[in-house]
Structure formats: C-alpha cells, structure tokens
C-alpha cells in the first residue's frame, strides 16, 4: 500500500474518532477536591524539619492516588501535605513515606535542572483560578529548585524561573520537603480567594506517578483541586531591582585581537496592579546564558533553537499564538512544527548571519486584567555595521472564553536583522475541553496572520487550524493544517519553509498493563505529514509507523519504528562540505524507507544509557545512523557522553557526520556547581568548550565565571587552531521591595 493511501486512511480514522468526541458532553471527571488554607502570623523556618506547631494546625492532605501504573488506584507509599500562609508567602510541607529510603533517587544536583530521573514532589499553583495556565514547582531530596510556566494546560516552559526556597531532610521511613513561595514571586489577584491547586509525586524505581487530583492519567492547571480561603495577602510594593555587572574579555586568536569590556546592566520589575507587571531592561547582558546543544542538519530547512534568556522567558506564555509548535506529531520535526511563528524572541538581539547585536533598553507590560491576558514588549536594538538601530514592538492580547478556551490577536512591528519595514498582525482561537464524558480530552485551534514587508507584495498570509485528542491512555488522534504563503515574512518570527500547505494527521493507541508485571505501558500508531507546494505538486510526504513503544515498570523503554518518505526537491541544497568537495541533493523526486530502533535504560540508576539507530534510504542513496549516550552519576557528580554518527552513501559522493558531546557536573555544595559542556562535529569542524562555575547563595542571587573556548580544524586535516576565547565574570543580585 502506498504512503498516500495510508495517509488518507489515517486521516479518515482521525476524522471519524474526533467527530465522535465532538458530540460528547462535559463531565467533571474526577470528583472535585478542595482544602482550606490556614493563615498564620509567624512563618515557619524553612529548614526541612517540621517541628513548628503551625504544621500540626494545618489540614493534612493524604488522599493521593496513582496515575501510573494504576489509574485512581491506591499509592504504594503514603504522602501527607500541609499548607499554611502568612500575608507574605505560602508554605507547603510534604512528608513522603518510602519503605526503602536508601533507594530514593536524587541524581539531579543543581537548581534549574529538570527532575526526570528523580523521586520528586510537584506543586502546581493557579493563583487566578482560570484553569488555563499556572506555575509548576518541583524539588527532589537534594532540595533542587526546578520551576516552570505553563504556556498551555498541557505544555510548560521549563526555562522560566522565579524566586522561592525549599529545604529537605530524611527520616527513618522517607523524606520531607518544606517550601516557601513568596507572593512577590507570583502574579496574582489578591481578590481571588480560591486558587487552582494540585500536587504530584514520583517514585522513579517503580515508575510510579501519583497526584491529588487527576483525570485521564493527567494533572495540570485545568485538572486541579481548589485552595480556598486565600485572603489578606501582601505583595509588597511590587518592585524588584536586579542590577548585574559582567566583566568580559574576548580574544580573536586568528586576528590577534583582544577586547575587554565592563558591562553593567539593570533589570527592574514592577507590579502596576497585583496581576499586571511592568519590566524594564537597560544595557541587557546575556554573557552568562547557557550555550545551545549542537545539532547536525541533514535537511534543507533551518533548525529551531529555544530561547534561553531570562528577560524574554518571563511571562512567555502570554505571547503564545495559535498553539503553533505544540501539535505533537512525530512525522513533523520540531523546526517544521515551529514554522510560521509570528514572534520568536531569539530573533531579537541577533543581526544578519547570527551576529549578536546589543540591546540598549527594553520594556514589557504583561499580565492579566479580568478575562484579558496581555503581553506587550518594546525593545530598542543598537545598530551594527550596515544594520541601523531599530525599535521593535510586540503586542499580544487574548480573552478567556467558554470554560477553558481563548481568543486573541497579535501585532509585531520592526525587523531586528535588516533595515526594511516589517509588521505582522494575526488573530487566533484556541478551544480546549479536558473533561469529556468519554474520558478523553479535545482541543482545537484556528489562526490567521498577514505580514507587511517593504518590497514584497501579495502572497503574504499564513493560516491554519487543527483538532486533536491527545490522550495519555486509549486512543489519541489529531489533524492539523497550515498554509504559509511565499511572501509571509514575520521578521521577529520563525519561518523555515514557505509557499506550502502542510497537512498532519496521527492516530495511535496506548495501553497500561496491570501493575506488578514487567511492562507498564505500550503503544503503537501512525503519524503522517504531507506538504504540498501552493503552486501545485508534492514537496514532502512522511509516514512514521510506531510498531511498538513500551515502558517497563522500572522506567526502561524501547521502540521499533518504520518510516516511508517522499521528497520533491526543486532547488539543489548542500548536505556536506569539506575543502575541495561539496555534496548537493539535486532537484528531483525521491522515495525511500527507513527502519529504526531505540532502547533506553532508566536514568535514576548510577549508570544508564541510550542507544538508537536506523538503516535505510536517504534521497537517492543510503543512510545508516547510530545515536548513543551513556550517563554516570554519583552523589555529587554527573558525567554524560554522547555520540551521533551518520554514514551516508550517495551517487554524488559518500560522507560521514559525527557529533560528540561531553557534559560534566560537579556539586561542591547545594549552592556551588561546576558545569562543563564540550561539543564537536565534523561538519563545522569546531570544538566548543563551555565551562562555568556557578554560585547561588539563595534564589535571586547569582555569580558566574564562564569560559567559552572554540577551536577549529579549518583545513579538515585534524589539526585544530584556537579561534576565540571569551571569559566572563558576572554578578547579579535581586533587591525586593
């Protein structure tokens, strides 16, 4: 059967399934839960020891249940949570029993890191009680702080951070976490006495997840209980002043030049109202931002790299548009899913060719006023060479409608990488229903945008729609459509493929086995993509068939997948280059199939590994690839090495790509870390080393020593030459009023 027939069949099944959901009625799902908050006069000491009398006065929350491996079944270990608050902060104490406390997994060492390998406590707060967005706080036995901002009810941005505190301790049969979250750290409306509220806990060695409130094996801001009695809260003046000083020395070894700079900068944050925030940045410095993980591009389209700069991450959820980038289809690459984003903050402060450009100052007003969600941003970017100074404006406003949905618009004006006038405007609608009577969830979106660029006339619109039921168990399905016209040009957005119509469809099934067996969960399914040129003809057709993807009860996993590909290339593109030789994929129609396997052991163990690989075609040739990673971890260190290998044979020439990474972490204490990342690939022939010493005496205070050192094998003769060295020393301190 051809891939086109399978795509059509997949689309038919998707439409049939989604149409059956459309007729389902709302259902409350799990019974609603609530807890009364206890206000106290004197705050407990955050030390991980629950010896203050106030904790005994608070109502205990003990009715947790499994969401994995069971669903609404009793947990293997008891959990008790208590909540109190003062006028200044909310306090959460969790006592988590464990019959084998010596097996509690806590490999993550430093603040800001995801806690996927760890036994963890999760707290979700929705201070506006909108059930649409919220804040996620996680910690492990090491007292690591990891926070995130929900950009939708099912997706969160883990790069977001705020100021809070946690201390942990152990007892004979488990561990304790004691948390303080200042009200100054949370956008909120003091007149809202009921908050959305939820807890989760993970026990990694059993692959067990538990929650206070869940539905369809999920918990998020839309699936939560209620914390009532929140009143008389004080956010202070609502002013944060964050000065920083960076001393930077940059060396260009090839040119023999050295540049020494002292860069003071200032960020300020002020609450115009309890739920509407203003921010100001002056002489913004990004010298301590972590480097990107390197990628080897074998495609004809640009890659997508996420934002890492704190100023642009704050309130990032308010700038989300059209749910672009969150469709969840494995046939579609991440870069393709992000295609047609009207606003992508990484374009700011970067000129043509990726050259950094100084940001002189900027301002942001963001937050919520009633049903309205507001995000506005203005940036004054400096000039560089032939690039003139520019003022960049973004305005995003949406309104909450129905129970969980919203409608809004976006406007951008300015071009950070050229001197051309550019603006974009668009409207979008997001539908969400997480509690259908069928036990499923249903979401949909529709959006339209148009750009206005000097010198480009007509064919400057982009629009799309989608409907999905992204369920954790049972049937999942979805369909999405996106059209990006040839001259659609969001100068502050992301477009890597234009003049196309992009169709996505997926259907799959996930099954959970009875607890206690070897396998915990398994799934299979089809993910399909078809991209047509607007002026006619096929560009891309992909079908990813997951024959089996399974997780064991100890968090090991494996997957077997096959893929069918069709590609129509209109213009040659280069896939490999070395001195004296360039290899191009020439125009033509290509059909090729691939097969792949992936195995991964649970990363809570002292030694874990990942191994994936594939064989099959690649345009008019063959490609065999291996991707592997090994991780060693102890109480104070992590060493992780990765290797990605592609052996490609084409009639026009053979070549090999290699990407090697080495990541090390060492914790001198709970607040002092030494982290290093070395990356090398034989396409750029650049060996990059980033090493940093980071001291965080407490949240909101940071000091860095960062070294970036790059070497390059210019002639590809295995002799590396020093290219550049950047040494930065940076201090940052938050004053709160």
Image: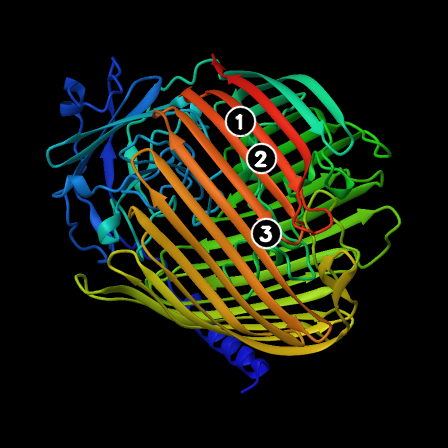
State the residue position of label 2.
374
Indicate left or right for 210 with 647 as reference. left
CB-based contact (under 8 Å), mark 2 and mark 1: yes
54 versus 343 height, above or below = above
Query: For residue 295, which numbered disc appears in the image?
Result: 3
Label 2 or label 3, whichever comes before in sequence order: 3
**What residue would you read off at disc 1?**
276
* Residue 561 visible from this viewpoint: yes
Q: Earlier in the sequence, mark 2 or mark 1?
A: 1
- Between 525 and 119, the residue placed more toward the observer is 119
Q: Which is closer to the viewer, label 2 or label 3?
A: 3
Q: Residues within 10 Å of mark 2 (few under 14, many from 20)?
A: many
Callout 2 secondary element: strand
What residue sits 61% from the left and 53% below the top? 338
Residue 311 shows in the view: no
Report the residue at 25% width, 17% height from top: 45
């Amino acid at each position: 059967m051809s891939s086109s027939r399978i795509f059509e069949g997949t689309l038919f099944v998707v439409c049939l399934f989604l149409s059956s959901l459309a007729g389902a009625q709302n259902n409350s799902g799990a019974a609603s839960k609530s807890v009364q908050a206890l206000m106290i006069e004197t705050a407990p000491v955050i030390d991980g020891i629950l010896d203050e009398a106030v904790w005994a006065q608070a109502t205990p929350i003990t009715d947790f249940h499994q969401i994995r491996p069971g669903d609404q079944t009793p947990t293997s270990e008891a959990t008790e949570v208590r909540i109190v608050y003062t006028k200044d902060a909310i306090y959460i104490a969790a006592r988590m029993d464990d019959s084998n406390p010596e097996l509690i997994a806590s490999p993550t060492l430093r603040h800001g890191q995801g806690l996927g390998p760890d036994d963890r406590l999760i707290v979700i707060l929705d201070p506006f009680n909108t059930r649409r967005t919220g804040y996620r706080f996680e910690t492990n036995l090491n007292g690591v702080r990891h926070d995130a901002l929900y950009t939708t009810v099912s997706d969160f941005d883990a790069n977001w951070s705020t100021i809070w505190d946690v201390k942990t301790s152990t007892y004979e049969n488990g561990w304790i976490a004691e948390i303080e979250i200042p009200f100054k750290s949370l956008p909120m409306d003091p007149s809202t006495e009921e908050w959305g509220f939820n807890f989760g806990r993970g026990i990694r060695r059993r692959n067990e997840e538990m929650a206070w409130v869940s539905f369809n094996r999920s918990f998020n801001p839309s699936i939560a209980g209620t914390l009532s009695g929140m009143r008389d809260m004080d956010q202070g003046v609502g002013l944060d002043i964050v000065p920083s000083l960076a001393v930077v020395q940059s060396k260009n070894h090839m040119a023999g030049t050295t540049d020494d700079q002292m860069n003071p900068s200032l960020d300020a944050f002020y609450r115009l109202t309890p739920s509407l925030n203003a921010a100001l940045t002056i002489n913004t410095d990004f010298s301590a931002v972590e480097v990107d993980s390197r990628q080897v591009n074998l495609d004809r389209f640009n890659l997508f790299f996420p934002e890492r700069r704190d100023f642009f991450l704050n309130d990032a959820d308010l700038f989300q548009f059209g749910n672009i980038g969150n469709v969840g289809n494995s046939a579609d690459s991440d870069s393709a899913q992000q295609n047609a984003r009207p606003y992508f903050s990484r374009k700011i402060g970067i000129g043509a060719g990726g050259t950094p450009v100084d940001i002189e100052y900027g301002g942001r007003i963001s937050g919520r006023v009633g049903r309205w969600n507001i995000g506005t941003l203005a940036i004054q970017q400096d000039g560089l060479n032939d690039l003139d100074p520019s003022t960049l404006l973004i305005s995003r406003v949406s309104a909450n409608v129905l129970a969980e949905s919203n409608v809004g618009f976006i406007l951008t004006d300015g071009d950070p990488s050229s001197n051309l006038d550019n603006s974009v405007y668009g409207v979008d609608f997001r539908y969400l229903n997480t509690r259908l009577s069928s036990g499923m969830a249903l979401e949909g979106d529709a959006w339209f945008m148009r750009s206005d660029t000097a010198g480009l006339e007509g064919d400057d619109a982009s629009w799309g729609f989608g409907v999905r039921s992204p369920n954790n168990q049972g049937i999942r399905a979805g369909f999405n459509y996106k059209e990006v016209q040839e001259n659609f040009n969001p100068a502050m957005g992301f477009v890597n493929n234009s003049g196309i119509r992009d169709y996505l469809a997926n259907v799959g099934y996930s099954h959970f086995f009875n607890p206690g067996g070897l396998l915990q969960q398994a799934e299979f399914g089809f993910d399909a993509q078809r991209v047509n040129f607007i002026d006619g003809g096929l560009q891309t057709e992909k079908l990813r068939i997951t024959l089996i993807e399974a997780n064991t009860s100890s968090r090991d996993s494996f997957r077997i997948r096959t893929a069918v590909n069709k590609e129509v290339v209109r213009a040659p593109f280069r896939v490999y280059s070395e001195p004296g030789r360039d290899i191009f994929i020439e125009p033509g129609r290509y059909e090729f199939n691939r097969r792949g396997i992936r195995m991964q052991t649970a990363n809570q163990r002292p030694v874990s590994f990942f191994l994936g690989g594939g064989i099959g075609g690649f345009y008019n040739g063959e490609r065999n690839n291996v991707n592997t990673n090994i991780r060693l971890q102890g109480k104070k260190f992590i060493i992780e090495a990765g290797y990605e290998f592609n052996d490609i044979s084409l009639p026009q020439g053979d070549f090999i790509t290699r990407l090697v990474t080495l990541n090390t972490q060492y914790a001198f204490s709970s607040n002092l870390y030494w982290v290093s990342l070395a990356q090398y690939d034989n396409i750029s022939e650049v060996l990059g080393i980033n090493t940093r010493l980071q001291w965080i005496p407490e949240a909101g205070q940071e000091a860095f020593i960062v070294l970036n050192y790059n070497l390059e094998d210019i002639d590809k003769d295995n002799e590396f030459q020093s290219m550049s060295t950047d040494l930065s020393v940076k201090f940052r301190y938050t004053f709160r009023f």
